[in-house]
């Protein structure tokens, strides 16, 4: 498959050349321009494939490898990186040199990074590279994986296996496959993610390295991952210029191979947004993990991609709070370069630090210094850092408030305080207001109602106020009234006259005795024709003393008596 892909690329390049030649013979201009630098910086020739490099041929077909190539995801965050073990070559070593400027922490640490300068895939199973505290000797990468028990692994190899222009990746893949199998068998619970080989810069010291070969190897890695069940991290798409197919500007150091800080920043942004959140199937609890001591330098003596007599790459990074100049340079052994540290506002420079490599400073405390390159540096070059810290400004503190005029119940007061910087602050104190305390009610009045007075006194100023109310007198007793005679109502007599007989004029209220006579209504006697007085008769059953009033009686009332008298 790889051989076929290589033949297709070469055929396409020949067709392109033929078209360009035809365009030139016809006098037509062409939009394609060959690189101006047909030779590398060291004078070595640039491969024919790269002279005719077609960026579109180096793009991984994600649809073809769906399920293998990790798709874009939400940002998995720093914890995702912390839970991942990184294995690889000198570019992996650089993950511990650069970091997030906001946090000031490197992307990886000695606890989750095993990177070996100049290492290729053939040394995965054989090179004893990682050391642990309490262990007498170093161990290989598969053995270290078993000890560290990671949840997932991101592996980046291949740069040191580049051999020139060949696109035949069969031997490279066979060797890589054996190394990955050994890692998987050592700890099958970890997910394996194989990263793409980083792109080269069009301007590079070793012109024999070919981006065409890098593309062919990456596609072969993707095919291997599909066949073996591994995941493929297609980070090359984040590092490559979409138009040219070479590494983006300033993403590599001056050698055109090793990633710069910008390149590493872009790589980790891609790692976090193309995450593989695999199920954690590791046996719990994990076995005790000894403290990693890291990789000893100089394990690989020869640098497979180095250019003899080449300049040593110098990467200059700035800690949080400042910038550096230059950020990337190079120099041959025993030569020097000038470096400057520029603190941001509110920060100050604290000194230079040699992160890796062999070099010396003329003055580590000076913001502008000279760095001299020593002999014996490897392909990883030299990394130096300028450190900064925030300027500690004394915080303004305020003293206690002091009273200038004390407030009263009704009037405001004044107070002030001063700061450690000599500043003064004034404020008005609110009037306190009266604090009233109530006394006892005082009651007056002997009548049925009493008037009460309550006096309040201010506990602060002594001012008083009163409150009045009224109540029923609890001690008042109303006088007992004297009894009054009760008037008996009289009953009027009936107006009908009564008749009766009586003797001797004695009213008896019964039948009359003695001589007959006619009684008058009032019980008096009347003179009869024979000169005798007839007895008064009662009223025919009237109560004694009830004498009918005859004053206004009609005259005909006596007419029957008179008639009787006449008859006699």
Image (cartoon, rainbow, N blue to C red):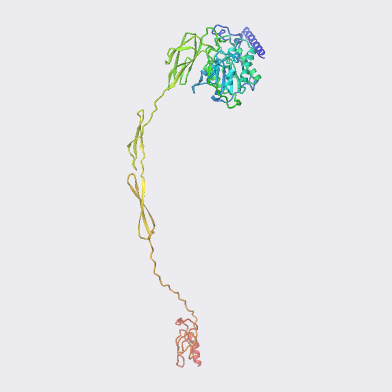
Residue 348 sits in quarter: top left
The answer to whether residue 237 of the structure is visible from this angle is no
Q: Position of residue 240 (x, y in %)?
A: 57, 16
Estimate the x, y position of residue 36 in percent, counting from the top left: 56, 9
Q: Give the quarter of the figure containing the N terminus.
A: top right
Q: Nearer the viewer, residue 383 or 31?
A: 383
- 41 relative position to 391: left or right: right
- Residue 390, x across and y down, in percent: 43, 23
* Residue 39 x/y as whole percent: 56, 7
- For image coordinates 36% across by 47% down, the residue present is 437
When asked about the image quadrant of residue 215, the answer is top right
Vertical placement of 415 versus 237: above or below?
A: below
Q: How many labels sit on residues?
A: 0
Task: Report if residue 562 is visible in the image.
Answer: yes
User: Which is nearer the eye, 444 or 14?
Assistant: 444
**Seen in the image, is 129 located left or right of residue 338?**
right
């Amino acid at each position: 498959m790889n051989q076929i892909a290589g033949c297709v690329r070469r055929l396409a390049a020949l067709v392109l050349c033929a078209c360009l030649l035809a365009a030139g013979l016809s006098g037509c201009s062409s939009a394609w321009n060959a690189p101006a630098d047909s030779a590398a910086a060291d004078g070595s020739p640039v491969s024919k494939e790269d002279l005719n490099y077609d960026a579109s041929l180096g793009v991984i077909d994600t649809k073809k490898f769906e399920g293998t190539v990790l798709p874009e995801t939400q940002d998995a965050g720093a914890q995702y990186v912390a839970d991942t073990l990184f294995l690889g070559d000198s570019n992996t070593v650089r993950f511990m040199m650069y970091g997030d400027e906001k946090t000031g922490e490197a992307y990886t640490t000695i606890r989750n990074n095993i990177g070996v300068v100049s290492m290729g895939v053939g040394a995965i199973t054989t090179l004893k590279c990682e050391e642990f505290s309490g262990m007498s000797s170093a161990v290989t990468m598969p053995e270290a994986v078993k000890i560290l028990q990671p949840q997932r692994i991101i592996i980046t190899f291949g740069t040191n296996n580049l051999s020139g222009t060949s696109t035949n990746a069969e031997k490279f893949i066979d060797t890589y496959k054996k190394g990955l199998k050994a890692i998987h068998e050592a700890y099958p619970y970890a997910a394996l993610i194989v990263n793409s080989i980083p792109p080269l810069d069009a301007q590079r010291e070793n012109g024999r390295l070919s981006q065409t070969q890098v593309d062919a190897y990456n596609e072969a890695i993707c095919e291997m991952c599909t066949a073996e069940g591994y995941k493929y991290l297609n980070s090359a798409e984040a590092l490559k210029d979409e138009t040219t197919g070479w590494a983006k500007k300033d993403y590599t150091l001056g050698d055109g191979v090793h990633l710069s800080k910008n390149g590493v920043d872009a790589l980790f942004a891609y790692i976090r947004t193309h995450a593989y959140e695999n199920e954690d199937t590791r046996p719990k609890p994990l076995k005790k993990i000894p403290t990693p001591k890291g990789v000893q330098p100089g394990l690989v003596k020869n640098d497979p991609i180095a250019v003899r007599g080449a300049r040593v790459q110098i990467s200059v990074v700035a800690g949080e709070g400042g910038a550096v100049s230059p950020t990337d340079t190079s120099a041959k052994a025993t030569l020097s370069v000038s470096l400057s540290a520029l603190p941001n506002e509110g920060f100050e420079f604290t000194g230079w630090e040699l992160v890796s490599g062999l070099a010396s400073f003329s003055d580590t405390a000076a913001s502008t210094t000279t760095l001299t390159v020593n002999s014996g540096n490897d392909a990883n070059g030299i990394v130096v850092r300028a450190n900064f810290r925030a300027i500690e400004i004394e915080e303004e503190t305020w003293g206690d408030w002091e009273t200038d005029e004390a407030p009263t119940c009704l009037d405001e007061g004044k107070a002030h305080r001063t700061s450690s910087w000599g500043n003064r602050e004034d404020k008005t104190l609110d009037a306190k207001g009266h604090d009233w305390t109530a006394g006892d009610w005082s009651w007056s009045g002997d009548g049925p109602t009493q008037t009460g007075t309550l006096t309040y006194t201010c506990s602060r100023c002594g001012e008083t106020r009163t409150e009045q109310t009224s109540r029923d007198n609890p001690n008042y007793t109303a006088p007992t009234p004297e009894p009054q005679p009760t008037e008996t109502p009289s009953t009027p007599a009936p107006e009908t006259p009564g008749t009766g007989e009586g003797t001797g004029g004695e009213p008896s209220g019964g039948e009359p005795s003695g001589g007959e006579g006619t009684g008058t209504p009032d019980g008096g006697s009347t003179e009869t024709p024979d000169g005798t007085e007839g007895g008064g008769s009662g009223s025919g059953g009237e109560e004694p003393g009830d004498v009918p009033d005859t004053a206004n009686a009609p005259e005909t009332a006596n007419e029957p008596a008179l008639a009787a008298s006449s008859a006699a």
